[in-house]
Image: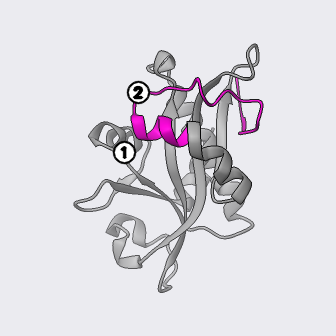
Amino acid sequence: MAVIPLDDGHDRAAFACGVESLDRYFQTQAGQDVRRRANGVFVLADKVQPERVLGYYTLCATALPPGDVPEAARKHIPRYPLVSATLIGRLAVAKDRQGQRLGAVLLADALRRALASAQTVGSSMIVVDALDEAAAGFYAAHGFIRLPEAQRLVLPMRVVERMVALA
């Protein structure tokens, strides 16, 4: 398996994770987002069947007010009106491959790419907007800090740097 940028050789129409909004995005919008540079879209593909998408995630730049950052993460951010961040907008695993830790593989790749990008463009943290409590639990189990009364979680880039160095 390998995580690579989405291209025209990937079978987007056959992908299904069981969440209608994630399936619809990948099948109908992901290619346009790549062409418009609105999102980076990365897929986990099997080396035997490289056209088959086992999972995907998206990355893009975002910013949030410092007051939205949890206290535990504030010591890692600069004091600017907006905090630069990298958004993992979507992350999904094919329904028939769920429960095989592929989500963790995709997340690890997203963290590495976000860290590499932050060294060039600047990004103080990674942000995710969890679709539900199960997704929020997944990100929390990987070190993300939940914002109060929200489905948004953050992970300071300094923490990502330590995680990547240990991997």
Q: Position of residue 97 (x, y in %)?
A: 51, 18
Please tell me how crowded label 2 is: few (under 14), some (14-19), or many (20+) other residues with Cα within 10 Å: few
Q: Is residue 15 magenta?
A: yes
Residue at 70% over, 59% down: 37
Residue 26's image quarter?
top right
Looking at the rendered image, the quarter that the N terminus falls into is: top right
Q: Which label's residue is closer to the chain start, 1 or 2?
A: 2
Residue behind mark 2:
18
Indicate left or right for 114 with 98 as reference: right
Q: Which disc number belongs to residue 140? A: 1
Indicate left or right for 4 with 115 as reference: right
Q: Nearer the viewer, mark 1 or mark 2?
A: 2
Q: Position of residue 8 (x, y in %)?
A: 76, 36
Q: What secondary structure is marked by label 1? A: helix
Q: Position of residue 133 (x, y in %)?
A: 27, 41
Indicate left or right for 107 with 116 as reference: left
Indicate left or right for 29 with 142 as reference: right
In the image, what residue type sits under mark 1? Ala
Residue at 58% over, 46% down: 29
In the image, what residue type sits under mark 2? Gly
Please name whichever residue, 163 or 7, is drawn nearer the observer in this view of the structure: 7
Residue at 71% over, 39% down: 6
Looking at the rendered image, the quarter that the C terminus falls into is: top right
Residue 113 appears in view: no
**Residue bounds of the magenta highlight:** 1-26
